[in-house]
Amino acid sequence: MFSIGDLSRRTGVKVPTIRYYEQMGLVAAPERSEGNQRRYSRQELERLAFIRHARDLGFAVEDIRALIDLSGHPEQPCGHADKIAQEQLISVREKIAQLKRLETELERIASCCDGKTVGDCYVIRALSDHALCADEHV
Amino acid sequence: MFSIGDLSRRTGVKVPTIRYYEQMGLVAAPERSEGNQRRYSRQELERLAFIRHARDLGFAVEDIRALIDLSGHPEQPCGHADKIAQEQLISVREKIAQLKRLETELERIASCCDGKTVGDCYVIRALSDHALCADEHV
DNA sequence: TCTTGAAGCTCTAGTGACTAGAGCAATTAC
DNA sequence: GTAATTGCTCTAGTCACTAGAGCTTCAAGA
């Protein structure tokens, strides 16, 4: 049996976050010691590692909940799990595209500034005047 | 003079968000009509456009507050504004790098799945077993 | 001038995914 | 046995908004 601190060290999930996941119903409430402390089995360790892994990949807690439900029904078709992963991939790609546009704009803003004072600082002027932008970035 | 709705249409900032910015002190409390409705000047329109622009570029509200303070002191050296923009650029680049790692991992996970049921779904297995990952992605 | 419907007002509470802190109790290592 | 560490619950805070209730004001047409 693992204490909550053991679990935290083994999965990299912080102790308060584990308790938070329990509150949210992502992990089940575990057994307790005589002194009311949480005691986890290996199975619970594995589930938390699963959650950690999915969070690292940017899945929302609701997606993870769905994936956990699915993994509890191994006989079902896996189209749903596939769909969740595909959607996550699309959303990650969209975020990358958006951030790249910002990167371009920021490079232009931050590198052109050769003003000595705020009065002729390109950063401030670029933010004040959208017309200075090379293209739309919304 | 502009009503809050006019301001919203012209800047693309939603009405409740404008009121929120006022509460946060990002924009000053404007004049009021006899019936207690907000009435904005062109200057206030421009400040809100500045804020919108900076938010679009991913600047945090605290950064924007600093940039606004700076733009009110045009005689000061602009190193600080430059620094804020540079840091924002670095942070955007870090986010892009992280998301690209996730993209690679998700591509692998979501494309390899040829299982018919959850029991042999690669998505679920990949999330359950970190050892299936090509490399670390934390 | 009256009416109606859109737009405005304040206030509270909710979102997601945690994080921080207070004030205790239990466990563990020496 | 005792001291340090770890654990417990509970409340409240983070960021940047967003939603809703219940009310008032404004602008345009009849």
Image (cartoon, coloured by chain):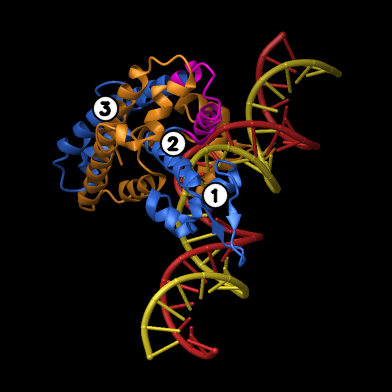
Chain colours: A orange, B blue, C red, D yellow
Residue sitting at 60 percent across and 54 percent down?
B31
Q: Is residue D25 above or below residue A60?
A: below
| Residue behind mark 1 | B20
Q: List x then y, in percent, for residue D18.
A: 45, 55
- The total number of labels drawn is 3
* Left or right, residue C18 beside residue A94: right
Residue B80's place in the image compared with B6, above or below, is: above
Q: Which residues are magenta?
A: B60-82
Q: Main secondary structure of the magenta part?
A: helix
As helix, strand or loop, the secondary structure at mark 2 comes to helix
Residue placed under numbered mark 2 in the picture: A48
- What amino acid is found at the position of numbered circle 1 in the picture? Tyr
Contact? badges 1 and 2 (CB < 8 Å): no
Q: Is residue B4 magenta?
A: no
Would you place residue A117 above or below residue D16 in this image?
above
The residue at 36%/46% (across/down) is A68
